[in-house]
């Protein structure tokens, strides 16, 4: 699973970092759902005036979705012969 980190400044001027955002292709059926979750997560962060600067998107997905959906989003392919 390929993930990325998003950094931006909030409306209060503090630097915010969101870790472990999954990279999905547009034709993936989960692409739209993950983007909606990411958008709502960023909105939640921006509207709150907290001192925390680093957030983990994987933990947010774990809390807000069904376990089966979480596993589909963050599935890792097993390597053959433990390579």
Image (cartoon, rainbow, N blue to C red):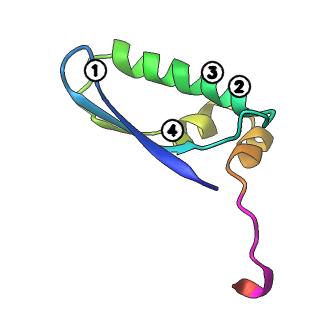
Q: Residue at x 78, y 37 (%)?
A: 28
Q: Quadrant of residue 37?
A: top right
Q: Residue furthest left?
A: 13
- Find numbered disc 4 in the image and state the secondary structure of the residue it sits on: helix
- Find numbered disc 2 in the image and state the secondary structure of the residue it sits on: helix
The residue tagged 1 is 10
Inter-mark Cα distance, 4 to 3: 12 Å
Q: Earlier in the sequence, mark 4 or mark 1?
A: 1
> Closer to the camera, 61 or 31?
31
In the image, residue 41 above or below residue 69: above
Q: Which of marks 4 and 3 is nearer the N terminus?
A: 3
The residue tagged 2 is 32
* Residue range highlighted in magenta: 76-81
Name the side, left or right, on which 59 lies relative to 15: right
Inter-mark Cα distance, 4 to 2: 16 Å
- Find numbered disc 3 in the image and state the secondary structure of the residue it sits on: helix
Residue 21: x %, y % from top left: 53, 41
């Amino acid at each position: 699973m390929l993930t990325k980190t998003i950094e931006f400044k909030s409306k209060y001027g503090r630097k915010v970092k969101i870790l472990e955002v999954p990279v999905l292709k547009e034709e993936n059926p989960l692409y739209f759902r993950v983007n909606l979750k990411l958008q709502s997560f960023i909105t939640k962060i921006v509207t709150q005036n907290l001192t925390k600067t680093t957030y983990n998107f994987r933990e947010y997905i774990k809390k807000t979705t069904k376990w089966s959906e979480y596993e589909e989003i963050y599935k890792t392919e097993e390597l053959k012969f433990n390579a």
